[in-house]
Image (cartoon, rainbow, N blue to C red):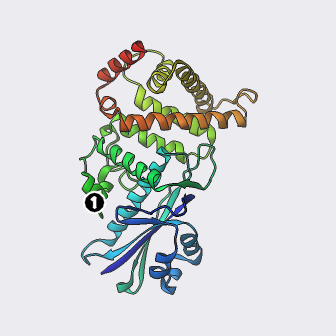
Amino acid sequence: MTISRVATIYNLKLIPGDTRVVFHDYLLSDEISMVEKYLSSPQFVAAIGSHSHKNLRDNCHFFTTGEIDEKIDILEVSNRGISVLQELTNFLWYIKDNSCNILNHYTHIPSQGNAVLGIEKNSNFTTCKATIEEVEFSKDEILKAAEILFAAHNLATSVKHVSVEDFFKVDGLVNNSGMTSSGMNKIDYGLRNRVERAILFMGTVRAAAFIPMKIALGMNVLECLFSDTSSGDIIHKIAERTAFYIGDSTEDRITSFKLVKDAYNVRSKYFHGQKLDKKEYNASKLEDISVKTDNLLRRVLTNVIMVDSAIFTSSDEELSKWFTNLIFKK
């Protein structure tokens, strides 16, 4: 039987004239031609509501249509679809800050009385300034996000690795990684390596709508990557290791060190219910820390995933030794 699947992606703008991206058999587009052809029947519009249909027409969307075996579970196919699309959307952050979200996915089945299966997901990400803004992406940027996403899945130790072919083919194994919205709770947290844990915490940072919370949770990301079982001042250790890991120069390392220390100060006061000094941490200052922390986290996580995944998935002892060598060779 023939089915059509579509998911609206909010706050994403595609560069005009850029060739479109096909991901997991879904075409990412801002054109309404496919929607008009396959998803504008009175029955479909009535099923999802005129407001949702207008959102579908007015925003970018992922669309796919084709034949499927009648024995296949449509609900499972739809859940897999929205999960992989949300993961790609989530990993756009590794390219630049954004508030892109996929909130729903519709499957239209004409042969079954124009039945429509709708799935909703809660993924209300905001920018590092806790705002909702439309952000433009090029095809190359979206493909780079997909590359980072695949690399992140490939270094996961809590599940079997998936091949590139399986990852990109229709209804492959990607949804079983435990990193998707549908599979997040199916994998024991203790089985995840430090990079997987950092990626999960980064999701909580982006989902937070309050800037002090974003800053505070961002330190959890760094602790996942730069802490170990050795004793000592944890704040100094995280700030120092972060600075030496990502800093390209002495000035860059000092700036990063001070930023992490500043962010930890916000975290300590916020998590302990203390007020933030109005002069030291006014709204403008907090926004500045959040923006700089967001950029720092992006640099760190992308480099960890794409360059240094082997060392960051090693033992605490090996990682601690590696950091000692890194710091004293500078």
Measured along the vertical axis of the image, is residue 107 above or below residue 287? below
Residue extending furthest top? Answer: 328
Q: Nearer the viewer, residue 183 or 140?
A: 140
Q: Residue at x 58, y 35 (%)?
A: 215
User: Can you identify the residue that label 1 sits on?
Assistant: 172
Residue 278 lies, in percent from the top left, at 75, 30
Measured along the vertical axis of the image, is residue 323 above or below residue 6? above
**Mark 1 falls on what kind of element?**
loop
Quadrant of the snapshot with the C terminus: top left
Q: Is residue 17 left or right of residue 231?
A: right
Q: Nearer the viewer, residue 16 or 251?
A: 16
Q: Residue at x 42, y 16 (%)?
A: 327
Residue extending furthest front? Answer: 17
Residue 173 lies, in percent from the top left, at 27, 56
Measured along the vertical axis of the image, is residue 229 above or below residue 200? above
Q: Residue at x 58, y 78 (%)?
A: 50
Q: Is residue 12 left or right of residue 224?
A: right
Q: Quadrant of residue 281?
A: top right
Within 10 Å of disc 1 (Cα), the crowding (few <14, some 14-19, many 20+) is: some
Measured along the vertical axis of the image, is residue 289 above or below residue 135? above
Residue 200 lies, in percent from the top left, at 42, 43
Q: Is residue 18 left or right of residue 323?
A: right
Amino acid at circle 1: Gly
Figure label count: 1
Q: Quadrant of residue 81?
A: bottom left
Q: Nearer the viewer, residue 52 or 31?
A: 31
